[in-house]
Image: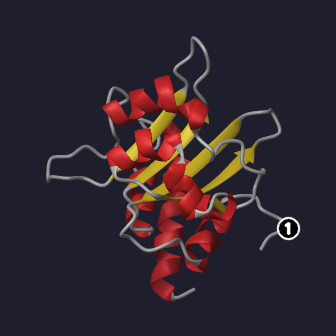
Amino acid sequence: MHASFDTDYDELIGLIYQGPLEEQPWQSALPALREMLDVQVVSLVLRPPAVGDPGLILNSVRPEGADAPALASPDDWELTAYRDEFFSLDPFVNLPLEKVTALEDILPDEALTASDYYRQYLHPIGLFRILGVDTAEPGGMLARLRLSRREQEPRFNERDRELLRRLTPISDEP
């Protein structure tokens, strides 16, 4: 890792620790992570959607304009559609705990583009590449972190995966 990455990493860790204490939780850490890895969307799933429960998903979307907020509104179409219709189709849920995984690791691009999830959700919002990690704390809380890029953007590389490994309590990887 080079010095600037380590400095950015140290700042990111500080923002993560600050995250739960912010008025709007993780309003600083998620955008910082999005910028650090140059992704379109960072999503933190603290409670997955279920019947009668919209769940708790925080998104930071690459801003389209100077006045764009740091975190996406929970009422944005992309988030409400995901919660209400597409979570059940998502092939990228319940990843092995504490294992950094790319969507392409479990679903080849050809199978993804043939799926209803891609055609009805990812394609309309312009997303294709996803990298994620699921973690669990001893009290039972699960947290799912997802990073998403557009199809024309680069695949996630080993540096991207290493950053997620450093952010999570992974003991047996690579």
Q: Residue at x 61, y 20 (%)?
A: 50
Residue 4 lies left or right of residue 152; in this view the side is right
Q: Residue at x 45, y 60 (%)?
A: 33
Judging from the image, the colouring scheme is secondary structure
Q: Residue furthest bottom?
A: 2
When the figure is inspected, residue 117 is found, relative to residue 152, above or below; the finding is: above
Residue 160 screen position, x and y as percent: 55, 72
Q: Please, what secondary structure does the residue beneath circle 1 have? A: loop
Report the quarter where the C terminus lies: bottom right
When the figure is inspected, residue 17 is found, relative to residue 54, above or below; the finding is: below
**Is any part of residue 48 visible from this angle?**
yes
**Neighbours of disc 1 within 10 Å: few (<14), some (14-19), many (20+):** few
Residue 170 screen position, x and y as percent: 77, 62
When the figure is inspected, residue 129 is found, relative to residue 83, above or below; the finding is: below
Q: Which residue is drawn at 42% across and 38% down?
A: 120
Residue 91 screen position, x and y as percent: 63, 45
Report the quarter where the N terminus lies: bottom right
When the figure is inspected, residue 37 is found, relative to residue 28, above or below; the finding is: below
Q: Which residue lies furthest to the top in this view?
A: 52
Q: In which quarter of the image is residue 94?
A: top right
Q: Name the residue under label 1.
A: 172
Residue 42 lies left or right of residue 99; in this view the side is left
Q: What residue type is labelled 1?
A: Asp
Q: How many labels does the image show?
A: 1
**Is any part of residue 16 visible from this angle?**
no
Q: Which of 75 and 86 is in front in this view?
A: 86
